[in-house]
Image (cartoon, rainbow, N blue to C red):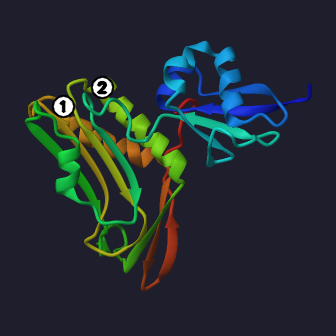
Amino acid sequence: MSVHKVKVLFFATLKAQAGTGETTLDIPVDSTVNQFKGLLLEAIPSLEPHMSSALVSVNKEYAFPEEVIPEGAEIALFPPVSGGSKAALPTFFEITEKEIDLNSLLESITLPSTGAAVFFSGMVRAVTQGGVASETEFLEYEAYKPMAEAKMQQVADEIRDKWPEVEGIAVVQRIGRLYPSTPTVLIACTAPHRDSGAFEAARFGIDRLKQIVPVWKKEVGPDGQSWVEGEYLPSPGE
């Protein structure tokens, strides 16, 4: 039987269960996604509790059970982007061109035990102060969506590791053309009380999103346009 090697990436809960973020696997030529998942379970049985709900991408595109995997493919596995158990720990992620609806988001991450909610929202500045003040006509945002959603899940997992009393988490990133005074990103955390970690969790969430979630912006103003690049370089395993 002819076989070929594929690269396999794991994110969030799948990464934790696999005990690694990356591996390789030999699979028969013309294997489907379903067959690949069966072979992966044979190689890493600890994935079994999460495999039935795992999403699969092949070469950075979502893949479905009967699709044939091409030779030398890069395959990624990650949980559904809604994340977690919604009844116990509501989690909401979205990359969107639509306006952010705060009331709807709050409703989606509120439990009967919720007594506090903290929202942070970044906005487009018309004028940026600094060494040299600059004007902005609009920002153009783009994202590597499948990876961004997986990394949003990672941010939520890290928040819950650090602040276990946090109940609901919402992370929303807008993309497309956004004008001054428009919200661009939102982190929201709910908890039973104001001292249950919601303030700290929201601050951590926005800082972490800026570090590891693949979203970029282009500033456009009277003097031209330029892509804004960050300085943070992820460490191995992030």
| Residue receiving disc 2 | 162
Residue located 43% across and 41% down the image? 81
Residue 153 percent across, percent down from the top left: 42, 37
Query: Which residue appears farthest toward the right when viewing the image?
Result: 1
- For disc 2, the neighbor class at 10 Å (few under 14, some 14 to 19, many from 20) is few
Residue 46 percent across, percent down from the top left: 56, 14
Q: In this view, does 231 lie above or below 237?
A: below
Q: Earlier in the sequence, mark 2 or mark 1?
A: 2
Asked whether the residues under the numbered discs 2 and 1 touch, taking CB atoms below 8 Å apart as contact, a structural biologist would say yes
Depth check: give the residue in front, 2 or 202.
Answer: 2
Give the numbered dot on residue 104.
Answer: none
Depth check: give the residue in front, 140 or 43.
Answer: 43
Residue located 60% across and 13% down the image? 45
* Image-quadrant location for residue 95: bottom left
* Image-quadrant location for residue 158: top left
* Image-quadrant location for residue 43: top right
Residue 103 percent across, percent down from the top left: 16, 55
Residue type for callout 1: Gly
Residue located 18% across and 47% down the image? 107
Query: Which residue appears farthest toward the bottom when viewing the image?
Result: 222
Numbered marks: total: 2
| Residue receiving disc 1 | 197
Give the alpha-carbon distance from disc 2 to disc 1, as whole Å: 9 Å
Q: In which quarter of the image is the N terminus?
A: top right
What SS does tag 1 mark?
Answer: loop
Residue type for callout 2: Lys
- For disc 1, the neighbor class at 10 Å (few under 14, some 14 to 19, many from 20) is many
